[in-house]
Image (tube, rainbow, N blue to C red):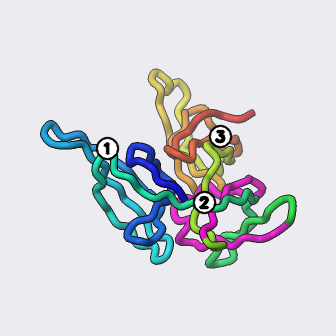
Amino acid sequence: MGMISTAQMKRGMYVIFHDEPHMVVDITFVSPGKGSAFYRVKQKSLYTGRVVEYTYKSGEKIEEVLVETHEAEYSYFDGSNYVFIEPRTYEQYSVAEDIVAEDKIYLKEGILYRIKFYEEKPVGLTLPKSIILKVVESENSVKGDTATNALKNAVLETGAKVLVPLFIKVGEEVSISTETGQYLSRKN
């Protein structure tokens, strides 16, 4: 564990806050016209799951928590945990539903994800930057309705809802950003 400056803090990083490990959920830099700059940080306790907001002074030192990372493929949901399998050793990791949270719409069988462990317990999940998913439902578009970059609603195989260009049809695969949830491209 090492000390870092508030300027080095990023979303998804793990830090010690009030003698407990926390994951940085959101961070905002604020530079008021008068006074010193500061960072407003939302952080989630690895023990309780409670999210707290705290204001750090710019340049303040914080202790970073080192977490272990394992790469594993998503396999299935057992009703309360998402099960991942390490492809080389076939070791199974169960990640609680509350840890995956809203990222469940980006879970697809056979894709590698990074699972974060603290004291041998899963505490986080890192998604790939983008994921390819099949369109299972979309609105019909009217021919010639392409004067602008018009978009329509589509539902993907994992239940994710996204806006796609009018030319995308049911059954096609599209690349989606897991960071923004936006359409990136069509896959052939």
Q: Where is residue 170, by image quadrant?
A: top right
The amino acid at mark 3 is Val
The amino acid at mark 1 is Phe
User: Label 3 vs label 1: CA separation?
Assistant: 34 Å
Q: Where's the N terminus, which quadrant? A: bottom right
Q: Which residue is mark 1?
A: 29
Q: Earlier in the sequence, mark 2 or mark 1?
A: 1
Q: Nearer the viewer, residue 122 or 136?
A: 122
Task: Determine crowd level at label 2: few under 14, some 14-19, many 20+ residues with C-alpha closer than 10 A.
Answer: many
**Residue at left 65%, top 58%?**
107
Contact (Cβ within 8 Å) of mark 3 with mark 1: no
Q: Which residue is mark 2?
A: 125
User: Label 2 vs label 3: CA separation?
Assistant: 23 Å
**Residue at left 62%, top 52%?**
127
Along the horizontal axis of the image, is 73 left or right of 45? right
Figure label count: 3
**Residue 91 part of the magenta segment:** yes
The amino acid at mark 2 is Leu
Along the horizontal axis of the image, is 97 left or right of 61? right
Question: What is the magenta range?
Answer: 90-118
Q: Element at badge 3?
A: strand
Determine whether 4 is above or below 95 in the image.
above
Q: Where's the C terminus, which quadrant? A: top right
Q: Earlier in the sequence, mark 2 or mark 3?
A: 2
**Residue at left 62%, top 69%?**
122
* Of marks 3 and 1, the one in the foreground: 1
User: Label 2 vs label 1: CA separation?
Assistant: 25 Å
Check residue 174 in the rendering and tell me which mark sits there, or answer none: 3
